[in-house]
Amino acid sequence: MGKARPPITLSPYHPITREGNRVTTFPYLSALTFLPMLGALVILFIPRITQQAARSIALITALGSLVISVVVLARFDPQAPFAAGVTVPFQERINWGQEVGASYFLGIDGIAALLLVLTTLICVLSIIWSWDTVNTRVREYYIAILLLETGMLGVFVALDMFLFYIFWELMLIPMALLIGIWGSSNRVYAAVKFFLYTLFGSLLMLVGIVATYWAYYQQTGVLTLDVLQLAQGEYGRTFQILVFLTFFIAFAVKVPLFPFHTWLPDAHVEAPTAASVILAAVMLKMGGYGFLRFNLPLFPEGTLFWQPWVIALSVIAILYGALVALVQPDMKKLIAYSSVSHMAFVTLGIFVLNIQGLDGAMIVMLAHGFNTGALFLLVGVIYERAHTRLIANFSGLAAVLPMWSGFFVLFMLASIGLPALSGFPGEFLVALGSWNYSPWIALPTFGVVIFAAWYMMWMTQRVVWGRPKGVMPDPHDGALTPTETALLAASAHGGHGQDHGDAFASPLPRMAGGSQEHSPDAPNPSQAPELHDAVDHGWHTGAVSEVPGEERQIWPDLSLKELLTLVPLAVLTIYIGVYPQVILTIVEPALERILAVVVP
């Protein structure tokens, strides 16, 4: 006879939702999570649906989720309890698998509340962006976007491990399809690589879920997959060290943390713009969220054991991502490698295990979502016009696309951590947390900020400033480069020197910096209309190139649709940079609860 098993006890049932101190029966979390899926089903089952109808249904359902997420955040009480045995904020619970202790259990803390708003906002902006840029398999495209949104929202609200795993897997397939069907030339390779990496991590996490579930049952006789209840278990040190790894690898792949990052550049480069934005702004955050929701509270001893190793990997990733970004010729790939570096700040802030680091990690996650998402949108804008992303193919876009260039410079500066923009407070707090952990970790890590400024400003200088492609340099410019001097000399030898001497004095102001500094000898701006009538400088549609071998860059500036996607992100980038306390007020109680479990 084997050892008798303890009696089976099932988790309690709480069929209510809580808004701060008020109780209501409206299922806010279910509504915002499954509304996109409902939209996907409507699009699927309407026969011969038009492209415009599919777009409209997708936008309406995504907007509905955004509104609900904002209502949830507005009514959320950061001080509300978040533990087993109490009604957690906006709780929804139905026991649907009593035989195994599984339940439909949704709830949020301050961390999840902010990530819900980020997710719904980014999905709305991605749908708006795709309005006239995706014209093949439109029906299937919006079904994939909406199913992906439901999967991502479900990850942030699920407090049952079985339900969490379902949502985690649900978002894998739509993203792989978005990359593999609507991506660039090497899209199938990138989609398969993304799928295999994520599936590998998911299967490891499944092993960890089963091990934790069984270990808790062996201790208590209770069959449950309730995350909050499982966090109250007392697991042995060896068990925590081993099972911590199964969750950690799954989330490290998603961050992605070195050396699990190699799928990311390919996925970003090959994915359509909207998928790149969702991937960077939301899906990468699920790794950081997983560390905070599972690794730290479930396995505190495992966290302390692996802490130095995770910090070491984070420092390597910060340096590696920055150095590799320096040599990228493709704008999208450069931004992708910058994400490896920035998201490593998140893991560093989490695992230094102090409140400054955790606060900073949360702000970095949100700021990265705004800044990097916007940069991918801006690269998508220029790709739609030029059909190339190579940095060498652009120059002087400030003169051609002034609004685009303004937004590009704003988000570039936010990305490198300029004070008063969203990138600064998070990195500063992570720096404080790292210094409190060890100055020897903080000093080399934040020396890499110089590299971040280097690769971002190098790209901006090449793309935004300088002489526009196809435009002859101004001979009156006092800072001509050798190449520009050679161009003028070649033109003069061709017998056009004197004519060009007048024509090159463009009536448009040259962009500051490099050879585009406006010369004191340039014509008075008041004379511009007359000069423009007399000389064709190509600043309008139909102009020809003045430089042999260079194609004139003549494209329309940002459209209304593109402004609608960029302005909200710009406002949030400035607001969080100026007033980060609004974020800290919401997340600090949750972060302090997590920290108290690991470092009593």
Image (cartoon, grey):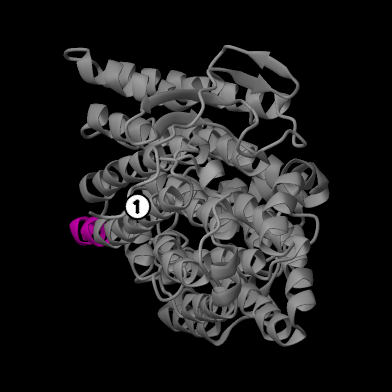
Which residue extends farthest front?
1
Q: Amino acid at mark 1?
A: Val
Residue that mark 1 sits on: 210
Rendered residue at 76%/60% (across/down): 355
Is the residue 431 above or below the residue 177 in the image?
A: below
Rendered residue at 46%/80% (across/down): 327
Tally of numbered discs: 1
Residue 472 visible, this orientation: no
Q: Secondary structure at mark 1?
A: helix
Q: Please give the range of residues in magenta.
A: 186-193
Rendered residue at 58%/49% (across/down): 232
On the rendered structure, is 23 left or right of 536? Answer: right
Residue situated in front as seen by the camera: 266 or 379: 266
On the rendered structure, is 408 left or right of 328? Answer: right
* Rendered image quadrant of residue 267: bottom left
In magenta segment, residue 190: yes
Dominant secondary structure, magenta: helix
State the image coordinates of residue 544 (x, y, percent, origin top left): 40, 56
Is the residue 175 above or below the residue 76 in the image?
A: below
Quadrant of image for the N terminus: bottom left
Is the residue 198 above or below the residue 323 in the image?
A: above
On the rendered structure, is 559 left or right of 161? Answer: right
